[in-house]
Image (cartoon, grey):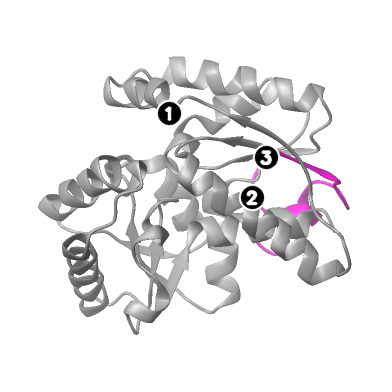
Amino acid sequence: MSKDWSKPFWQLYRSSYETIGLISGMSWKSTATYYKLINETIKEELGGLHSAKIVLYSVDFAEIETYQATGNWEKSGQVLAEIAKKLEKVGADFIVICTNTMHKIVDQIQQDLVIPILHIAEAIAEALLESGVRKVGLLGTKYTMTQAFYKDKLVEADLDVLVPSADEIEEVNRMIYDELCKGETYSKSRATYLTIIKRLKQAGAEAVILGCTEIGLLVQQDDTEIPLFDMTTVHAVKAALATL
């Protein structure tokens, strides 16, 4: 199905949803943020004792990361597809995959589902268009920054995408897997990220996507003047709004 960028996710497929199916654990640190943000959004919108209806499946990230590192994307797709079908069976109305990188195999996951997947890159594209941004810097894993599965969604929305240099891509990727996914944050790494963000701004970026669900654990908007679009926040809030 071709994306209609004039309509948000929840209007594109059907008028309303009730229950969110989260595929999480990649890593569990960002999953905690997803759960918190979704419920905070519902509370803000509805007040009182309202909270989100969620069914959640958390994977063992070590298994998934092994498939990533060895290029066995088909196997990782099989694992996540089985999880998605389980969530559908127990009542999820749509799926949220709580990671950027695994959207590489989103078509493989979607093909056996009746319910839709809220694509993380489509969610950020909607947010960028709503904010008037047209040229954006992208940070994330090396897969997200260099492969077409993510950037093509942004280009489809008429966005111009900038990425760091090859050496910077490797360093950003290393810090994600060796530090952030383990819950480790260092001031030296924050300084490195901010230097790369500054270079993206100098290259013409009007905003920068924090395109890995862990980067927001290290870098926040108060650290830089250029607008940051934290994928975890954007994805989680759009998922919550889809249920209203």
Residue 149 is situated, as x and y percent measured from the top left of the image, at 43, 40
Three-letter amino acid code at the position of disc 2: Tyr
Tell me, yes or no, whether the two marked residues, 1 and 3, touch with CB atoms within 8 Å: no
Question: In the drawing, does residue 173 fall left or right of residue 52?
Answer: left
Between residues 9 and 79, which one lies in front from this camera angle?
Answer: 79
Give me the residue at 79% from left, 46% from top.
13
Does dot 2 land on a helix, a strand or a loop?
Answer: helix
Please tell me which of labels 2 and 3 falls first in the chain.
Answer: 3
Give me the residue at 29% from left, 47% from top.
176
Distance between the Cα atoms at labels 2 and 3? 29 Å
Quarter the C terminus occupies? bottom right
Mark 3 = which residue? Answer: 1
Please tell me which of labels 1 and 3 falls first in the chain.
Answer: 3
Does dot 3 land on a helix, a strand or a loop?
Answer: loop
Residue range highlighted in magenta = 1-21
Crowd tier of the residue under label 3, counting other residues whose Cα lies within 10 Å: few below 14, some 14–19, many 20 or above? few
Please tell me which of labels 2 and 1 falls first in the chain.
Answer: 2
Three-letter amino acid code at the position of disc 3: Met
Residue 5 lies in the magenta-colored region? yes
Q: Nearer the viewer, mark 2 or mark 3?
A: 2
Mark 1 = which residue? Answer: 61
Q: Is residue 42 above or below residue 89?
A: below
